[in-house]
Image (spheres, grey):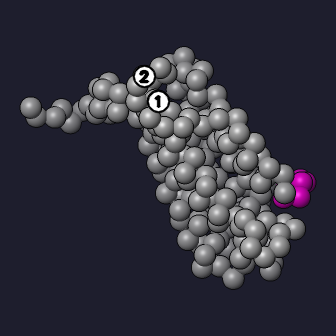
């Protein structure tokens, strides 16, 4: 049977139009993971090692936290793509309030920012890459909120909360990379 180029299928067997809000949300999550990957590559090439404030050698770096975030985003894609209660949903671990707490704890290690003005992105290549990931994250969150509202997907509330806190982490990390070494 020939595939219809206007539709795509999900792991739980549903077939939806490619422009369905669910696929829009999945696409934004995929783009976010890619943008975070670009930011991680920028951090690796940066003279600033990306340690969290107050970090000692050998503890988590911003890049390691972002890699963990990419793993959470993969799980989030599974949450979005699978209907609540479907057998495909049981094959993976959903995003939870514990995931939100982990990224929240990382965010809390940055000093509180009181900027009083807008900060243009692009202080350097690393901060610009992290800022780009932040803007994609905020778009992904808006898209997820639209899906939650339009499809009644209250099961995605932890996913939305994670994106909200992740965007704050990305903002603070970008400002840290703006700072001179």
Report which quarter residue 82 is drawn in: top left
Mark sitting on residue 86: 2
For residue 38, above or below residue 107:
below
* Magenta residue span: 110-117
Nearer the observer, 84 or 93: 93
Percent x, y for residue 85? 47, 20
Report which quarter residue 44 is drawn in: bottom right
Q: How many marks?
A: 2
Mark sitting on residue 90: 1
**What secondary structure is marked by label 1?**
helix
Q: Magenta segment, principal secondary structure?
A: loop
Q: Is residue 176 left or right of residue 134?
A: right
**What secondary structure is marked by label 2?**
loop
Instruction: Give the Cα separation between the discs numbered 2 and 1.
Output: 7 Å
Q: Residue at x 75, y 42 (%)?
A: 101
Q: Residue at x 54, y 46 (%)?
A: 73
Percent x, y for residue 146? 56, 27
Are the two marked residues, 2 and 1, in contact with CB atoms closer than 8 angstroms?
A: yes
Percent x, y for residue 174? 72, 63
For residue 17, above or below residue 175:
above
């Amino acid at each position: 049977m020939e595939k219809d180029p206007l539709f795509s299928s999900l792991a739980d067997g549903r077939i939806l139009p490619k422009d369905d809000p669910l696929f829009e949300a999945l696409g934004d999550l995929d783009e976010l993971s890619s943008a975070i990957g670009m930011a991680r590559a920028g951090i690796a090439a940066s003279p600033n090692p990306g340690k969290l404030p107050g970090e000692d050698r050998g503890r988590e770096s911003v890049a390691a936290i972002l890699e963990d975030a990419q793993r959470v985003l993969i799980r989030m894609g599974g949450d979005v793509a699978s209907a609540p209660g479907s057998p495909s949903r049981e094959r993976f671990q959903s995003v939870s309030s514990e995931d939100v707490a982990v990224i929240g704890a990382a965010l809390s290690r940055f000093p509180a920012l009181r900027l009083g003005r807008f900060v243009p992105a692009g202080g350097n290549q690393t901060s610009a890459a992290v800022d780009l990931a932040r803007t994609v994250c905020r778009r992904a969150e808006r898209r997820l909120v639209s899906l939650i509202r339009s499809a009644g997907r209250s099961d995605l509330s932890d996913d939305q909360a994670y994106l909200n806190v992740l965007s704050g982490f990305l903002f603070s990390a970008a400002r840290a990379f703006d700072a001179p070494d």
